[in-house]
């Protein structure tokens, strides 16, 4: 018999030195069609609702205290005046960092006092308004305002049963702002939020307007960064 190797005999492969072969399954056009269709449907359902999710309205019933972010436009302050025209609201706290401009034309140096005076001129009893100004910061202005408010609230010696407060702010800033105030004030406080719609764009068609799209995208990015431990 011949000792020659059979042509059908398997020849052992040398082990790979740099690379090895792998089989990678790739999606067919049918799967791509299903995935892209699902993504399009999800976007069609979610995008129009994104603004409402950010501009949340979730007040605490019968809250005796109110927070107003001092940088908001005056039509927000007008809504605050209308909503708080009741003896159930004991105090209105205004927050804010130093003014960006105009300090040479006014006696006030921060948005907290500016909003407090504005609401007093509108007709709210000045004795019910308390300004809680914050120091100037480069980042995390909302958190700085919440921290300044906490100092004032801690000095008020408010009973635990009364520690319910509603935050008034503008549009899509509401969800992030309420989260920051709740984290800063702590679990002893129940923080509600009331988002007053911005008049700069139509909230129902925000994705068709540059002002609306910019506002929503900026707030969404800030909220994601906050959730991920960013600034």
Image: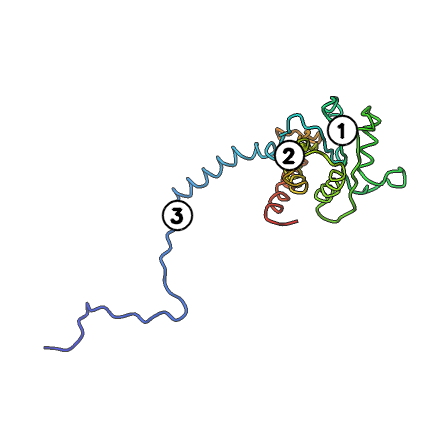
Q: Secondary structure at mark 2?
A: strand
Mark 2, residue position:
190
Q: Quadrant of residue 9?
A: bottom left
Q: Quadrant of residue 87?
A: top right
CA gap, disc 2 to disc 1? Answer: 22 Å
Q: 34 or 154: which is nearer to us?
A: 154
CA gap, disc 1 to disc 3? Answer: 55 Å
Q: Secondary structure at mark 3?
A: loop
Q: Earlier in the sequence, mark 2 or mark 1?
A: 1
Mark 1, residue position:
77
Q: Earlier in the sequence, mark 3 or mark 2?
A: 3
Label 2: how many residues lie within 10 Å, few (<14), some (14-19) or many (20+)? some
- From this view, report whether residue 188 is shown above or below residue 123: below
- From this view, report whether residue 221 is shown above or below residue 208: below
Taking the spot 36% from the left edge, 62% from the top edge, the residue there is: 21
Q: 205 or 188: which is nearer to us?
A: 188
CA gap, disc 3 to disc 2? Answer: 50 Å
Q: 34 or 231: which is nearer to us?
A: 231
Looking at this rendering, what residue extends furthest in the left direction? 1
Taking the spot 78% from the left edge, 47% from the top edge, the residue there is: 136
Residue 114 position within the rendered picture, expressed as x and y whole percent measured from the top left: 82, 35
Residue 162 position within the rendered picture, expressed as x and y whole percent measured from the top left: 68, 31
Single out the mark in the foreground, 2 or 1: 2
- In this rendering, position of residue 7 left or right of residue 151: left
Q: Point out which mark residue 164 bears.
A: none
Label 3: how many residues lie within 10 Å, few (<14), some (14-19) or many (20+)? few
Mark 3, residue position:
27
Residue 41 position within the rendered picture, expressed as x and y whole percent measured from the top left: 48, 35
Residue 108 position within the rendered picture, expressed as x and y whole percent measured from the top left: 86, 38
Q: Is the residue under label 3 in contact with that under label 1 (CB below 8 Å)?
A: no
């Amino acid at each position: 018999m011949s000792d020659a190797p059979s042509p059908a005999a398997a020849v052992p492969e040398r082990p790979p030195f740099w690379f090895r072969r792998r089989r990678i399954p790739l999606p067919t056009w049918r799967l791509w069609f299903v995935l892209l269709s699902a993504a399009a449907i999800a976007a069609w359902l979610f995008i129009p609702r994104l603004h409402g999710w950010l501009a949340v309205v979730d007040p605490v019933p019968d809250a005796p205290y109110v927070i107003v972010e001092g940088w908001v436009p005056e039509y927000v302050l007008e809504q605050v005046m209308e909503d708080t025209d009741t003896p159930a609201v004991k105090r209105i706290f205004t927050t804010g960092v130093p003014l960006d401009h105009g300090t040479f034309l006014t006696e006030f140096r921060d948005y907290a006092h500016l909003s407090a005076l504005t609401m007093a001129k509108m007709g709210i009893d000045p004795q019910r308004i308390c300004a809680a100004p914050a120091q100037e910061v480069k980042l995390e202005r909302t958190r700085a305002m919440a921290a300044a408010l906490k100092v004032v609230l801690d000095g008020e010696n408010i009973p635990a049963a009364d520690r319910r407060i509603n935050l008034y702010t503008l549009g899509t800033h509401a969800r992030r702002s309420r989260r920051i105030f709740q984290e800063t004030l702590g679990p002893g406080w129940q923080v509600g939020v009331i988002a007053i719609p911005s008049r700069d764009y139509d909230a129902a068609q925000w994705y068709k307007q540059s002002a609306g799209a910019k506002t929503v995208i900026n707030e969404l990015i800030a909220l994601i960064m906050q959730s991920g431990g960013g600034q």
